[in-house]
Amino acid sequence: MADETLQDFRKLDMANLDRRCYWVQKLCYGMGHVYNDLCAAMWFSYTLFYLQIVLQMESKTAGILIMTGQVVDALATPVVGYAVDRTGARRAWHLAGTLAVSVGFSLIYCLKPTALNTWVLIDYGFVISLFQIGWAITQISHLSIIPEIATTHRYTSDLTAIRYTATVCCSISVYLITLIVLKNDNDPNKIGPDDFYKFKEIALIISLIGIFASLIFYCGALTKEESRSDYDIIPESESDSSGLVTNEEVTHFLKSSIIYKVSLMYMASRLFTTLTLIYIPLYLDEKGARSEDTGDGIRQTIASVPLVCFVASFMTSIALKFRLRRCSDKVVYLVGIILALIGSVWIKLGFLFRSDSQLYVIASLIGVSGSATMVSSLCLTAEFVKVNGYGGASVYSTVTFTDKLISGGVVLLVQNLQCTPKEMCPHFYEDVLSYVCGIVSLIGLGSLATLHCRLN
């Protein structure tokens, strides 16, 4: 009797230990994309602003550099996905990507050209390409670990939610750092070439934080070969519940129509978030140029408005963790798209009243919609990988390829549509946030509708 009791206690202790180990692994996994997330927040929110306002580049030239980075990232993504699936050395790939990111990202904000000539633009193109290749390697290797270590849909949702929560926290950190660094100036209403060293300081702080987070990931995150033996197989009933099992006999995931619909949903979510991140700072600068009273100087609003957006996103990601079982990923995505459309319409119509407080409400809507659509689209992608048995890295590289290539093309198109001189289009960036982002949301809604019709 005593031996049986002792064995029961040992089993209970082992179960508690396994549960704690799982949570440690989940948290360490979330740290693996922190550096990428920090750099992405800086890249999308401030790089175009930095090139145009601080380095005084022309709108088209800055757009070409952003497009270069996105195209390189997009082209590298499928190659990286194939290589990671073939080699299986996910943490080694992650380390290589982190090293490339640390060098390329730092140089983007540390190079100070004395004149903007062809060679300077080539230098910027090279370091941007290095950064984006490293970013793609880190992203794909990190995403491909989810199907390797997740045992159930619940576990997949936890990893995805933790990953997105880490993304939101990183973005919040970037905006807080930017607010602290930029606000330390006598003129709160102007940002210009004299702020080069402030942006350099922000970039170096981000790199230090990101490298430290990556070290935590390498210490605690396990891969399939290290941890899969103790895992259970997902029950067939749970796998089928998402409706993502392909009914056709397919030998490659690209032959399944579902992957294109899921990719389009992910692309719409990412593109909406990306465009709002890029053009909100430029919109604030445009608004200030129209001599409208913003209440706070641009040195504060350029960080506080995106900060409000990501605080709302963070709260949403936490709420999604406790959503009801009946609230499926497709329902969450639909709610997010509706909020995104409301925000786009409000930007154009709401500011007729010239109330600056509306900007923070709209930022909250953008944050909630971005979080809802991103988490749900990633969950749908992870389920597609798991229930059909495809290579995770290859599928994720295909899904993100569309987002990266199209986002770069859209930014380049928008930059080339800018009037010369800018004063001829005083509401240009306002229209971008309203019309372009609204169209992107409608694309996401359409892709969701086609996926729903197929499942029915």
Image (cartoon, rainbow, N blue to C red):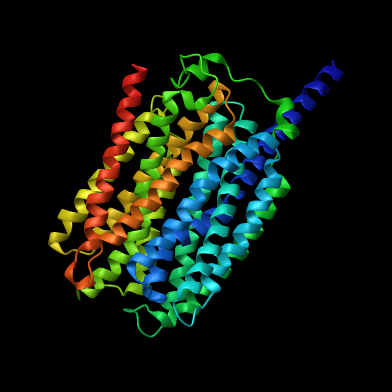
Q: Is residue 159 left or right of residue 64?
A: right
Q: Position of residue 150 (x, y in %)?
A: 61, 31
**Residue at x 57%, y 53% (from the top left corner):** 133
The residue positioned farthest toward the bottom in the image shown: 186
The residue positioned farthest toward the front in the image shown: 118
Location of the C terminus (image quadrant): top left
The residue positioned farthest toward the right in the image shown: 3
Location of the N terminus (image quadrant): top right
Q: Picture quarter containing residue 231?
A: top right
**Residue at x 18%, y 55% (from the top left corner):** 348
Front residue of 30/450: it is 450
Front residue of 331/59: it is 59
Is 60 situated above or below 344? below
**Total numbered labels:** 0
Front residue of 59/435: it is 59
Q: Position of residue 95 (x, y in %)?
A: 68, 51
Q: Picture quarter containing residue 111?
A: bottom right
Q: Is residue 52 left or right of residue 205?
A: left
Q: Picture quarter containing residue 369?
A: top left
Is 121 situated above or below 84? below
Q: Is residue 252 left or right of residue 222?
A: left
**Residue at x 37%, y 51% (from the top left corner):** 409
Q: Is residue 52 left or right of residue 14?
A: left
Q: Position of residue 148 (x, y in %)?
A: 64, 32
Whether residue 372 is visible, yes or no, is: no
Front residue of 12/137: it is 137
Whether residue 214 is visible, yes or no, is: yes
Q: Position of residue 71 (x, y in %)?
A: 46, 51
**Residue at x 72%, y 26% (from the top left corner):** 230
